[in-house]
Image (cartoon, grey):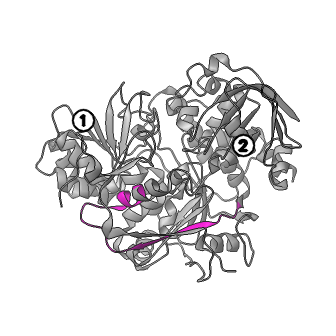
Amino acid sequence: MGMTMTQKILASHAGLSSVSAGQLIEADLNLVLGNDITSPVAIKEMEKMNLNKVFDKDKIALVPDHFVPNKDIKSAEHCKCVREFALKNDITNYFEVGEMGIEHALLPEKGLTVAGDVIIGADSHTCTYGAVGAFSTGVGSTDMAAGMATGKAWFKVPSAIKFVLTGAPKKNVSGKDVILHIIGKIGVDGALYKSMEFTGDGIKNLSMDDRFTIANMAIEAGAKNGIFPVDDICENYLKMHSKRDYKIYSADDDAEYDEVINIDLSSLEPTVAFPHLPENTKTISEIKEEIKINQVVIGSCTNGRLNDLRIAAEILKGKKVKKGMRLIVIPATQAIYLQAMEEGLLRIFIEAGGIVSTPTCGPCLGGYMGVLAENERCVSTTNRNFVGRMGHITSEIYLASPAVAAMSAIKGYIAAPED
Amino acid sequence: MKALGTVFKYGDNVDTDVIIPARYLNSSDPKELATHCMEDIDKDFVNRVKPGDIIVATKNFGCGSSREHAPIAIKASGVSVVIAETFARIFYRNAINIGLPIMECKEASEAIKEGDEVSVDFDSGIITDITTGQTFKGQPFPEFMQKIIDSEGLLNYIKNK
């Protein structure tokens, strides 16, 4: 029986010629990732167990990004713990505040995640690297600790849902609309424990930034990972960003899937997920009432990349945000920030009445830099709209693309740019 | 090993943000986390929960972030087992890795009600609702995961191996 793309990567890293869904395996890891919230727990666990050595100082990435620059004394202590661990173990890929970025934007940009890798990260959005043809999945701090100590992790081999993407998305429809559409269709546990394997000739019409956004939110459908085939666009990206050798795996023709779902990208519309689940989606034309909002966030590991900022800037250029609107723009990495500055995008955001922040996860998880008060509403390009996620438990988050977010900031209510 | 306690009942998709809101993630101290456990879905949970109590929920319990703080907070608050129809996969892993007992059982997750007295026998997987007299058969763990649980967590398991 054939294997899916994910199964092939896992088999090769477990030293097996083949694996099948449900099988428990131990796989070698190419990279173990942690941030300022999850790493301290892992580091303390390692210390408690007297696991004093890391398996490979080059294969661990530590990225303080959630409450960084330190939002309070306790966060500062967490960051200090990570920094000291990185120093003590001579970790190559520790990123201090001036070098950093939001982990899932930063690591591919730095070339640390390439096709064929097996990657675990103590952050649920680690599934992002499926965009470059890697198997990557989120784990907790204990798995991270075990991974740092041994270079291995146990996995239950997942079955898969195949998504066949055809056609080209319309103007103002991007990766965010594709993944929100899919989550709306299958639900927040629609791919529970499974792989989401994206295929089809529509993929060539999706930029790498679109693919990162789509793979990033696979977890929002409960998936173990989301993964894209490696095509020319992906290979160009890998060559531009990484010096590492990569390996291309493709699904067997006779691979078994639990389900095959066809999606015509040209039929998709700008899509918004209503509170309080990413599956509560409506297309922009289904929203009849004016939903007034107080804040717009453009950023995060989902939509803080250069293309996202370009799309938002194109809409905001020469316009002003609605009086009383708080527009918060957060480039996801220092390199994206710099490039956005050189392209004049930051000037557009500031002249429109927005603010631009250094890279941080801050508002996405209600940490800081844009926490919501009672009954406030936010249109956000982030990934979760759970109760209380961005602040007060009565506040509401509407998940959307950078295009919808930018237009909503101008209008003061949820709106999409017209074609 | 057995658990016995009063049930706190929740619905579908109880996410890690309501189990332990991110505003408290500047701490990783189990005791401190426990003082905010379930705060955004059930303000009274921390005042009512007693050692041994049981959480029962329906689908996709623990969805959302990878924060191990979520099962840590539940365990530190004294909860002896979480029963659900399904668990989100990272939460499932984390619970096993830190030694918080969990059990998948669709029938139990539907039938058991808030405030019921319930006992769980981990060896047999039998869940008994003492209040109603109903019994259910939960999903036993694969042998490999049982070994991690028996070692009281993943790190002990890899150390002992």
Q: Please tell me how many numbered marks the rendered image carries.
A: 2
Q: Chain of mark 2?
A: B
Q: Residues within 10 Å of mark 1 (few under 14, many from 20)?
A: some
Height in image: A215 above or below B10? below
Q: Amino acid at mark 2?
A: Glu
Q: Residue at x 35, y 42 (%)?
A: A398
Considering the numbered disc 2 on the image, is that residue within a helix, a strand or a loop? helix
Report the magenta residues as a range: A156-180
Instruction: Work out which residue is located at the far top of the displayed protein and give it.
Output: B47
Q: Residue at x 63, y 57 (%)?
A: A193
Q: Residues within 10 Å of mark 2 (few under 14, many from 20)?
A: some
Residue A354 painted magenta = no
Question: Would you say residue A37 is visible in this rendering?
Answer: yes
In which quadrant is the C terminus of chain B drawn?
bottom right
- Quarter assignment of residue A413: top left
Q: Residue at x 56, y 24 (%)?
A: B42
Q: Give residue B37's mark.
A: none
Circle 2 residue: B107
* Residue A181 pos. (x, y %): 40, 58
Instruction: Work out which residue is located at the far bottom of the displayed protein and give it.
Output: A253
- Quarter assignment of residue A8: bottom right
Circle 1 residue: A292
